[in-house]
Amino acid sequence: MDHAYLIEVASMLLRWLHLIVGIAWIGSSFYFVWLDNSIKPPTDPKLKEAGVGGELWAMHAGGFYNPQKYLVAPKALPKELHFFFWPSYSTWITGFLLISVLYYFQAATWMVDPAVAQISATQSVLIGLGTLAGGWIVYDLLSRLLIERSQLVFAVIYTLFVAAVAWALTHLLAGRAAYIHVGAMIATTMSGNVFFIIIPNQRKLVAAMKRGEAPDPTLGKKAKQRSVHNNYLTLPVLFAMISNHYAFTYSHPQGWLVLVLIMLGAALIRHFFNLKHKGEWRWEYPVAGGAILLAVLWWTAPAPVVRDASKPVPTLAQVMPVIQARCAACHAENATMMPSAPGGVMFDTEARVRQHAQRIFARATQTKDMPLGNITGITDDERALIAAWYLGGTR
């Protein structure tokens, strides 16, 4: 079976599975943070005597539900106790396999950009893997040192760390690879919280009860802290995962700052919802988050391209040789530099070039992220020719 086809199939199946299990993990994270912030102290003396610290009545799909949370643990372990860890583990595993198929196995294409740094494909992969592992180590160290002292100080220092990583990666890797690795680093940290802290602490609580000992409440507290961190990191990670579709972000000269600001805006908006679940309506957070996002969108807007009216408008016949030489190696029915045309976008006929004229203009002359890593060597004069043709009416 064709190697290129296998890559496409693996990418499709892994992306699909990654999305499914990711929804399950994010859904449970959002639900339990909402539940913790929404439960109220019980009024039933029997529940208080049993050690229940909070409860909630809810209705969903025609059914009544009454979830309860114990202050530390019930007096006796139930016969069945569900742990929420497989959604996290499967999300990380499928994500790692997906980034391997899309980036590590095709590093020369997707991770290396000679205009950014003169590194080899192997070096780019090592940088990516080191980022995933190093991100967890630094985060865990900061958490252990700072969380008990000040959550705010921890948040500020960790944000600065993410900004430093984003800056470094955008000076080492191709833009989209840099963005995806900042997101993957944070996602690895989230799964690390589950694997190294949350689940082990839960198992220690259960083991203590099985031995007839009083469970240590600090174990639950530390696990909950990491779970809440994961909740705040979710929206920034999701943006990084979709960022490869939006070249105006990662191709910006200050792309690292664009990424950090968007992630910060998302975290502020998430904070509003977490507070709202507690009954606190702090509108300054979504206003600040929204203002940051709008400011970034204004900042990243491409400068207008103006056609020199003193020169004749190029014809498609003049533009086609440039597109065939610089673009069609990837964007063609029989692509030679890609397994298949990315996004199914092809420029191998005049009709298709006219159909995608706006996209060609945007990516070749405004964001200038195409050709990918300028692997085909398009010149500034050729970009200007495409711009003049598009602005002149694509005749």
Image (cartoon, helix red, strand yellow):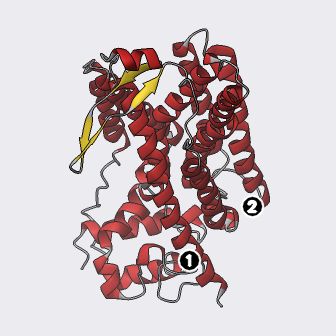
Q: Amino acid at mark 2?
A: Ala
Q: Which of the 4 image quarters holds residue 272?
A: top left
Image position, residue 244 (x, y; %): 48, 56
SS for dot 2: helix
* Badge 1: residue crowd in 10 Å (few <14, some 14–19, many ≥20): some
At 59% from the left and 47% from the top, the residue drawn is: 184
Q: In this view of the protein, which residue sits in the foreground, 168 or 100?
A: 100
- Residues packed near mark 2 inside 10 Å, few (<14), some (14 to 19) or many (20 plus): many
Q: Quadrant of the C terminus?
A: bottom left
34 relative to 339 in the view: left or right: left
Which residue is pictured at 29% across the width and 56% down the height? 306
Q: Which residue carries the number 1 mark?
A: 8
* Outermost top residue: 149
Q: CA distance from mark 1 to mark 2?
A: 20 Å
Q: Is residue 382 left or right of residue 130?
A: left
- Residue toward you, 343 or 357: 343
Q: Quadrant of the N terminus?
A: bottom right
Q: Is residue 328 above or below residue 116?
A: below
* 252 or 245, nearer to the observer: 245
At a point 32% along the width and 55% down the height, the residue shown is: 305
Residue under the point 59% across and 27% down = 223
Residue 150 percent coordinates (x, y):
56, 10
Residue kind at label 1, given as amino acid type = Glu
Name the N-terminal-most of marks 1 and 2: 1
* Front label number (1 vs 2): 1
Q: Is residue 288 visible?
A: no
Residue 332 showing in the rendered view: yes
Q: Please give the residue where the numbered disc 2 appears in the rendered image.
A: 121
For this rendering, which residue is in front, 145 or 74?
74
Is residue 256 rendered to the left or right of residue 128? left
